[in-house]
Amino acid sequence: MKAVLLVGGLGTRLRSAVASLPKALASVGDRPFLELLVRQLARQGVSQLVMCTGYLAAQIEETLGDGDRFGVKIEYSREVVPLGTGGALKLAQRYMQHESEFLVLNGDSFLQIDFSELISFHQKHDGLATIAVVPVQNASRYGTVQVEADDRVLRFAEKTGDNVPGIINAGVYVFGSAIFTEIPEGPTSLERDVFPNLLEQGVYAFEQNRLFIDIGTPDDYGRAREMYNRLADAALYKH
C-alpha cells in the first residue's frame, strides 16, 4: 500500500521559530521532523511514498531524495499554487491509479500507530475513509470529531477555543480510491470541505491512545524538540 504525505503547507504560524524551512523539515533532535514519518512508515513495511510538496518544495526534495537511504521509494507531486490538503491529494491522483486504497499522513504531526491495524480496521468497516483520532485534554485549537458507538463519525465540529477535552483528528487516514471523485478541482481542504460531505458514505474513526503531537505552533514545536527521544523510539517501534 502506498502512503501520501501532505507536506506542502505554508506553515505561517511556525515562521517565527522556523523562518527558512518548510514546516515538515523543522528539526527535532538531529533530524528533520519529516524524517521521523518516513522512518516510521519504512519500519512498518510501507515503502512506496508520494510527497505532496508546495512551499519550498525543492528543500524537501533535496533533503529526502529518492528515499533510497531510508529503504523507501519517494515520488513527488509538486503544486505550483497553494491547493490545500484536498487539492494537493487530488493533484497526486496520477500516482495512485493502481491503488484500491492508500494511506495519507499530514506532514506536520506524528502519531504512534500500527498501520496494519489501521488498514485492517478500514477494511473491516468497508467505508470510504478511516480517520485516526486521539482524545486530548485540551481541544481548544482543534476541531473535534463526534463518533458513534459503532466507530462511525457522526459529525465534525469546528474549533471553539474552549479549553475542554475532546476527540481530534490525528492527521492519519486510509482512503478508498473513490475519494478522488469526491474532491473538487482546485484549492480545497480535506478537513473543512471534503470530510463533512462523506459522512453518508461511511467515515470511521480509529481511536488511539498513543503518543501524538503536531508542530503547528511554536509552543508545540518546542515540545516536539524536547521529546525527540520518545518520538524517535515511537517511530522505530516494531509493532
Image: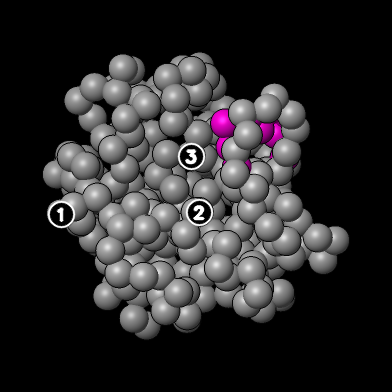
Q: Residues within 10 Å of mark 1 (few under 14, many from 20)?
A: few
Q: Residues within 10 Å of mark 3 (few under 14, many from 20)?
A: many
In this orientation, which residue lies closer to the viewer: 60 or 214? 214
In the rendered image, which residue does mark 1 sit on? Answer: 80
Question: Where does residue 46 sit, x and y in percent of width and height?
Answer: 45, 61
Question: Where does residue 195 sit, x and y in percent of width and height?
Answer: 54, 62
Check disc 2 and report its element: helix, strand or loop.
helix
Query: Of discs 1 and 3, which sits in the foreground?
Result: 1
Q: Which residues are magenta?
A: 135-143
Work out how far the residue at label 1 is from the one at label 3, CA to CA, in angstroms.
Answer: 23 Å
The earlier-in-sequence mark between 1 and 2 is 1
Question: Where does residue 109 sit, x and y in percent of width and height?
Answer: 48, 39
Image quadrant where residue 34 sits: top left
The earlier-in-sequence mark between 3 and 2 is 3
Callout 1, which amino acid?
Answer: Val
Work out how far the residue at label 3 is from the one at label 2, CA to CA, in angstroms.
Answer: 15 Å
Give me the disc on residue 109: 3
Check disc 3 and report its element: helix, strand or loop.
strand
Q: Residue furthest right?
A: 149
In the rendered image, which residue does mark 2 sit on? Answer: 191
Query: Of discs 3 and 2, which sits in the foreground?
Result: 2
Work out how far the residue at label 1 is from the one at label 2, CA to CA, in angstroms.
Answer: 21 Å
Assess whether residue 178 is covered by the magenta stretch: no
